[in-house]
Amino acid sequence: MKDKQEVKLLLHETNKLYPHVLAVQVIRAVINSLIDILNVLFLGLEVNILVTKQNWSLALKVGLLFLTIKFILNIADNYFSELADRHSRLLNQRAQAQISRHLVQVDYETFMSPKFRQLYSDISEGMQFTGGFQQFIANVVNDFASFVVTLLTSGTIVCYILVKGWQQAAVNGQGPIFLVFLLMAVILPLYLSEKVGNWSGKIFQQFFAVNIKFNRLLSYYLEYAFTEISVNKLLRLFDPENTYLQHAKKQIINGTDRDEKIQSKALGVYVVSDLATSLAIGLLYVVIGLFIVQGGLSIGNLISAVGTLELLITSLGNLFSSWGKRAGSFKTMEQFSEFMQMGEEKSADKPKLLKTTDFTVEFVHVSYRYPGQETYALQDVSLTLKSGVKTALVGQNGSGKTTLVKLLLRLVRPTAGKILFNGQDIADLDLKNYQDFFAVVSQHFFLTAESLAKNVAADRKIISAKVQNALTEVGLDKKVAGLELGIETPVSNVLSEQGVNFSGGEQQKLAIARAVYRDSKFYVLDEPTAALDPLAEAEVFDQFADLTHKQTALFISHRMSSTRASDYIYVLDKGQLVQQGTHAQLMKKPGIYSNLYKAQAEFFKK
């Protein structure tokens, strides 16, 4: 029952991904099966005509008819085979495209959840190592359709011919013997096909489970550990004896050995199956051949009966084999369906944020707990961010600062409480329009390998003069002026030899230039300088304060250099708001703020 429900679900998902792909695959299977059956029937019929009737004229006519039908079927087969192959290849590509779109469109909270990310990893590996939708279409659907056609045609033909043979044998008093041997010759290969299909399926599941882990291991070593510059440098300095390399080599060799053992086991099963099937078919020829000698069947009927039965046995064997291997691709496709249903995608049917320079953002008793966590990252926080005010949000690592920013930007939703924009719940506003209100420079920024202009403009239209102005504002104008391609210079040499690798500090300035280019109403600087020393960080915050003159800005840091340029300060500790006020007010009060500031002050004094 479970298998039936799985197949129904997967057929539905497959048709949604690529309408008509199932129909094309079935038509292809039907044509292939008809060609195979036609070849066997023609040979048997021609032998009967030539040996029994010795009618060369009739044999020629039958031959011409056969060639005409086969010519037509071959043309159809070539067309539908190419169409089916192309569609099955595109099926996985469409699935990958939907996955990529869902990764971008799904809400951030779901995107960051461990279950969502694990599903994505499992699907990626499953698509690579089991074939995913393509494997399901090319094997299970194709083999099932082929078997049905072969059963209806070959089964009918075999039954007709063998019943005639049995009737003739019965007349000669050999009916029971013929029936016993015939049943043995027919049932044995069918039974073996079913058993081998199950055995191979179990072996394939084992192979799939082992290979997922093994290929993950290979990817880690070959695509990260031995290629990443920082790791390579570390190994050269701290592992001169290559112990790490030897450990990796041992793990890879052990994984390869496991693979070989499983593949050898699978090969053994198939060899035994092929031998048994060949013996059974040989037995069929012997049994039916004996009755030819007795005059029960013609040679042509022998060829047709054994040939069509062999097609039926082969088709059934293929179906059992594909069905036995279904677990890997079925699991991947089920994971795909579950993955695509997780989370909520962006919606544009909500009211848009009014363009205003006078606004207030209020956190009203806001709490947030990450999925799967028992403790709150932020608890019962109430604060106000006003237009034209530069606000600092400070606290030690783990105090809840970044979580508060995620809530402000609607990357996650409050577990409790509300966030209001001019009195309206931000959850009721259009997401894209709301997020466009902010220009963010975060701790984890990303620059593409495209041009400087593209990186600075991001999702906005590229205006060269505006790009140049943003680069000047962050102090990169002289650097860019010395580049041959100017703002068209790729920000990496990964995709272009003309690309330039910028330093860490320069990349941070580019991230700030991107924020400047947006002309947003609200700037958010979320610990983008965490890797810099306190003095360098203070300079960056000062520069950003100048850039956002008379603008609304929120500075977030566990260091205190950001507070000097701020009009108002909020202090977080262990997810709770513990202090607030101006710098002068907070320095007069004993507490976290004054302690942190005094402890760090010597590092950013000029």
Image (tube, rainbow, N blue to C red):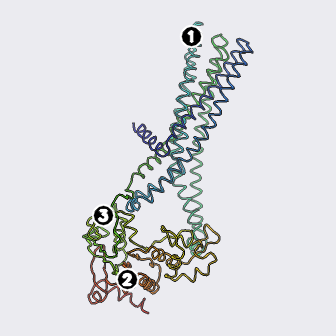
Type of amino acid at the residue the image marks with label 3: Glu
Q: Quadrant of residue 174?
A: top right
- Give the residue number, with chain letter if any, for mark 3: 374
Q: Residues within 10 Å of mark 1 (few under 14, many from 20)?
A: some
**Earlier sequence position, callout 2 versus callout 1:** 1
**Rendering coords of residue 391 (x, y %):** 34, 80
Of the pair 277 and 136, the residue shown nearer to us = 136
**Earlier sequence position, callout 3 versus callout 2:** 3
In this rendering, is residue 109 above or below 445? above
Alpha carbons under labels 3 and 2: distance apart:
41 Å
The image quadrant where one finds the C terminus is bottom left
Q: Which residue corresponds to the image point at 56% horizontal and 58% vertical from the top-left?
A: 218
Q: Residues within 10 Å of mark 2 (few under 14, many from 20)?
A: few
Whether label 1 touches label 3, CB < 8 Å:
no
Q: Which residue corresponds to the image point at 60% horizontal and 56% vertical from the top-left?
A: 253
Classify mark 2: helix, strand or loop: loop
- Give the residue number, with chain letter if any, for mark 1: 167
Q: Which residue corresponds to the image point at 33% horizontal and 84% vertical from the top-left?
A: 567
- Give the residue number, with chain letter if any, for mark 2: 550
Type of amino acid at the residue the image marks with label 2: Lys
Alpha carbons under labels 2 and 1: distance apart:
103 Å
